[in-house]
Image (cartoon, rainbow, N blue to C red):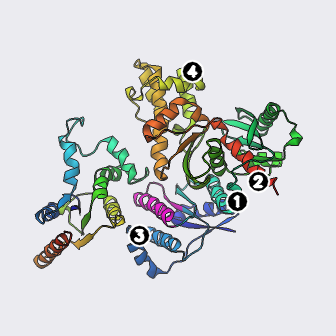
Amino acid sequence: MIKIAQLSCGTEYSGVQGEIENAASTVGAKMVAPDLDLKDVDSALEEFGFIPTSPQLRMMIARAVQLAHGRYDADAVFIATCFRCAEGALVRNEVRRYIQNHTRLPVVTYSFTERTKSGQLLTRMEALVTIVSRKDLLARERQVGLTAGIDSGSTTTKALIMKDNEIIGKYWLPTGEVIASAEEALEKAIEAAGIARNDIEAIGVTGYGRFTLGKHFKAKLIQEELTVNSKGAVWLADKQRGEATIIDIGGMDNKAITVRDGIPDNFTMGGICAGASGRFLEIVAKRLKVDITELGKLADAGDYKRINMNSYCSIFGIQDLVTSLAAGSKIEDVASAACHSVAEQVYEQQLQEIDVRQPVIQVGGTSLISGMVTAMRNILGIDPIVPKDSQFIGAVGAALLASGFIEG
Amino acid sequence: MKVFIVPPNSLILFDLVERFGHEPLSAMKAVQERLRNLEVDSPPINVTPEDVKRGLKYAGIEVPSGIRGRLALWGPLIDEAEAAIIMEEAPYFFGCVGCHRTNEMVKYLLRKRNIPILEVRYPTDEEEAKAMVVKIKEFLEGLR
């Protein structure tokens, strides 16, 4: 049983403790609270250096210190405080940094509301468990044999065939009915690869539809997209060794992941707000009457500074863009402002939760929109690497990891 | 040496640090540029929206903007501080009529720097005041 240490404040009285425990037990883990003697609290606070007013946040810090000193064994750490609590937000971030500086445990942070449900926590918990329990599998750097990967994303379904560490067939299409979309993508990828379906030795599935597809295809690997995408990204970018940061702005949610030797050690996952996603860019393209594939070039020809954009929100942000168009702004500038807005929100909401390490690998469907890459470059001051086939990271990662099940 | 003072706009601490031959790092120093800089749209203002974004280096997006704005000003000074004096339980008129959460964070950031820090309490009578000034004097002289 994987033990996830819970460092939190407010969960009991927010009605989410049960949801946290449900999410953990669904992925075969158990939430535990590091043992604490009350006399340890003061010395822990002194060592930590932050003395919050809230007694429960003080306990949270003291528990973190117990973990850092190895006085309590856990496999991973879940750090959570209430959304909208200033002191909680300060402590949560600093506890996360402290744990990462003092231990090698994978960490996930979360700020919850009373509406948080176990489903929202599932992918994060699953990723923690995968990092702990499948270290050997995640350490795979080469794909062997003939395997397929299917990524059933919120917007698109991708399928890909790999043979002996090379991509030999791939296909993507907009996601409709999950199984039908995956069947079509896989058939077309098989056709492109010039193989027979029976030749495939193992299938790996990831993405929102992974559990449904896992059963349908009798997949060897059914795994959340945080670890799978990390693997796919470092393979595609040929950065399997050392550190890297992966930015994956998807159709529905975003991931920012730091990796060491291809294994994630910290990640954040957005997804509550459509303003920082591919969906927002789709709406913009539609409003500008251009194909989404043309939006990037259009943005590169514009200047976001000429647009007054006061909101990231997919409703109010669009309103700003519509107002700008009505006032006679150029569509290039509007496209640029839209890309800048998404990049800025990813930066402000997610990248400050992780310590960005170079190189930065930008992947996912939105990495094909050149204006998005330009916007990330402007904001980070770092030139992101966009590997070939960057939208196929999930499928590549799944095919690569699935090959771990066919080797002796 | 560069000595950060808490509360960051305490005139008494500023004066003591300067009097004993050190450079005080204070809110006055951080705000001064914004009050005088003609490039800032409508001075005098303490922070700009860009400053608040820069404050993300010190506090996450869910931290209220007032904390991030303050940290955008004081964070860089904390980074360059070589020592600090922290005055606890100071009344409003002594220093910043500020945000308690920011104060917590400022003290934490200072403690993390592993620099010499003197922590004193606001004195309640003349004897305590004298003792406090002596303590500060000894601390500042010891920094040389």
Chain under disc 4: A
The residues bearing labels 1 and 3 have C-alpha atoms spaced at a distance of 34 Å
The residues bearing labels 4 and 2 have C-alpha atoms spaced at a distance of 43 Å
Q: Do discs 2 and 3 belong to a common subunit?
A: yes
| Amino acid type indicated by mark 1 | Asp
**Label 2 close to label 1 by CB (< 8 Å):** yes
The mark found on residue A136 in the picture is 1
The residues bearing labels 2 and 3 have C-alpha atoms spaced at a distance of 42 Å
Q: Do discs 1 and 3 belong to a common subunit?
A: yes
Position of B103 relative to A216 (above/below): below
Whether residue A98 is in magenta: the answer is: yes
Q: Say what secondary structure mark 1 lies in.
A: helix
Q: Mark 1, residues whose alpha carbon is within 10 Å: few (<14), some, or many (≥20)?
A: few
**Label 4 close to label 1 by CB (< 8 Å):** no
Tell which of A53 and A239 is nearer to you.
A239
The stretch of residues the image draws in magenta is A79-102
**Label 3 close to label 4 by CB (< 8 Å):** no
**Label 4 close to label 2 by CB (< 8 Å):** no
**Residue at the spot of label 4:** A290
**Residue at the spot of label 3:** A48
The mark found on residue A404 in the picture is 2
The mark nearer the N terminus, 4 or 2, is 4
The mark nearer the N terminus, 2 or 1, is 1
The mark nearer the N terminus, 2 or 3, is 3
Residue A127 horizontal side relative to residue A209, left or right = left
